[in-house]
Amino acid sequence: MSFRDLTACLPDWVEGFLADPDRVYASTEARMRLVVELSRLNVEHGTGGPFGAGVFETETGRLVAPGVNRVVPANCSIAHAEILAIAIAQQKLQSYDLGSEGMPAHELVTSTEPCAMCLGAIVWSGVRGLVCGAREEDAQRVGFDEGPKLPDWVGALEQRGIAVTRDVLREEARAVLVSYKETGGPVYNGRKSTR
Amino acid sequence: MSFRDLTACLPDWVEGFLADPDRVYASTEARMRLVVELSRLNVEHGTGGPFGAGVFETETGRLVAPGVNRVVPANCSIAHAEILAIAIAQQKLQSYDLGSEGMPAHELVTSTEPCAMCLGAIVWSGVRGLVCGAREEDAQRVGFDEGPKLPDWVGALEQRGIAVTRDVLREEARAVLVSYKETGGPVYNGRKSTR
C-alpha cells in the first residue's frame, strides 16, 4: 500500500443481487426494503456490520448506488454504508454534488439513523432527502455508538434543505440489528470508537 | 464505474514531496509545518482545496499517512484531507483501529479544525490525539462551512480520550486559507453543502 490509493469495495454478492441496473423502487417502503435486505445479506455473507444504504433518484426511485458497512473486512473505519453509497453515487455521476443543477434530486435511504460522521457526510453530499429505518437508540441498544452528534440533528438537516423521514419499516430494520447481536456478531466498539 | 469500487487518490506530487518514507517529525510544530505545506502545495498544484492533514506516530513523530483535500478533482465530497489520511493510514497498517492493542499511539494533525463529518471520523479512527492549525472560524471567514457540529466538540473528543491541541502555527495555516481566497480559488459551497 502506497500513500496514493484509498480503496474500499462492496462485497462481490452485491452486483449479483442488484443484477438489473435499471431497477426502480417506486415507494419509500420499497427503497427501505432494499436497504434493509442489504443490511441482512451483509451479515448473512459475513461481509460487514448490519447496516445498508442506498442513493436513489427521489422522483423515479432508480437506484444510483448501494452501500453496506465494510469497516472490519476493508480495514477502514470510514467505510460505513452511507459513506459508500454517497461516494459510489458521486463516482458514477462524476460529481461531488448530488444536488448539482440539471441533475434530478437524490435521496439517501439508510437502514439505521446516521452516526456523527455520516450526518456530516450527508450534508456535503448534495442529497435533498434522508430516509431512515431503525432509530439511533435501536443501534445503541445493540451496543453501537452514534458518536458526538447534535441532539437536534434532524432539525439541522432540515434547516439545510434536507428533508428527513424516520421510522420507515423500523421494526424490520431493527430486527436485523437484534438478530446480529443474538448471533454474536462483533460490535467492534473499541473505546466506544467505531460503529 | 460499477457499484464495486470506491477509489480516491492523492495527487501525484505527494509521493515525490514525501520521498523518504521514514521521515520523522519530532515536534508538534514540525508535524504542523508539514501538513500546512501540504495544504499550500495542494493549492499551488491545483489539485484540491486548501487543506492538509497527516497521521503520525505520537511518540516517534513518524509520518504514517498524509492527506489533502480532493473533493473537486476526485468528484467525492467525502475526500477531505483528514478522511484520506485516516483511511490511508488504516490501509497501511491493515487495521480499522489506529488505537489497537500492540500498536503505537497515533495522532491526526490537520491544517484546519475538522468539519462535522471529519469530527465523527476522528472518533471512529482510533487516534488518541488531534492537533489543529487554523480555527474553524478562519475557514468560515474564507467561506467554508463546518457543518452541523457540536458546539463543544473539543470536550466531546476529550471525553472519549482524544487529546486536542489547538492553534499550532495558526497564522501560517490561516495564511494558506486567505491566499486561496485572494487568488480566487473555488469555495465550492453549494447550498452551504460542501467544504
Image (cartoon, coloured by chain):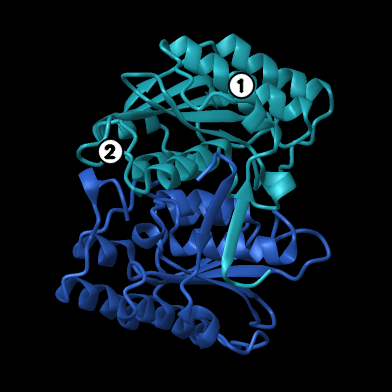
Chain colours: A blue, B cyan
Rate crowding at label 2 as few (under 14), some (14 to 19) or many (20 or more) other CA atoms within 10 Å: many
- In this rendering, position of residue A68 left or right of residue A135: right
Q: Quadrant of the C terminus of chain A?
A: bottom left
Specify the label residue B192 is tagged with: none
The relative height of residue B188 versus residue A98 in the rendered view (above or below) is above
Percent x, y of residue A154: 46, 57
Q: Are the residues flagged by discs 2 and 1 from a single subunit?
A: yes
The relative height of residue B53 versus residue B70 in the rendered view (above or below) is above
Q: Which residue is mark 1?
A: B138
Specify the label residue B99 is tagged with: 2
Q: How many marks?
A: 2
Q: For the residue marked with disc 1, what is the amino acid?
A: Asp
**Chain of residue at mark 1:** B
Mark 2 residue element: loop
Percent x, y of residue A37: 41, 83
- In this rendering, position of residue B83 left or right of residue B103: right
Percent x, y of residue A70: 41, 63
- Residue shown at 60% from the left, 69% from the top: A107
- Residue shown at 45% from the left, 57% from the top: A79
**Chain of residue at mark 2:** B
Q: Are marks 2 and 1 in contact (CB under 8 Å)?
A: no
Whether residue B187 is visible here, answered yes or no, is: yes
> For the residues marked 2 and 1, what is the alpha-carbon distance in whole angstroms?
30 Å
Splitting the image into 4 quarters, where does residue A138 fall? bottom left
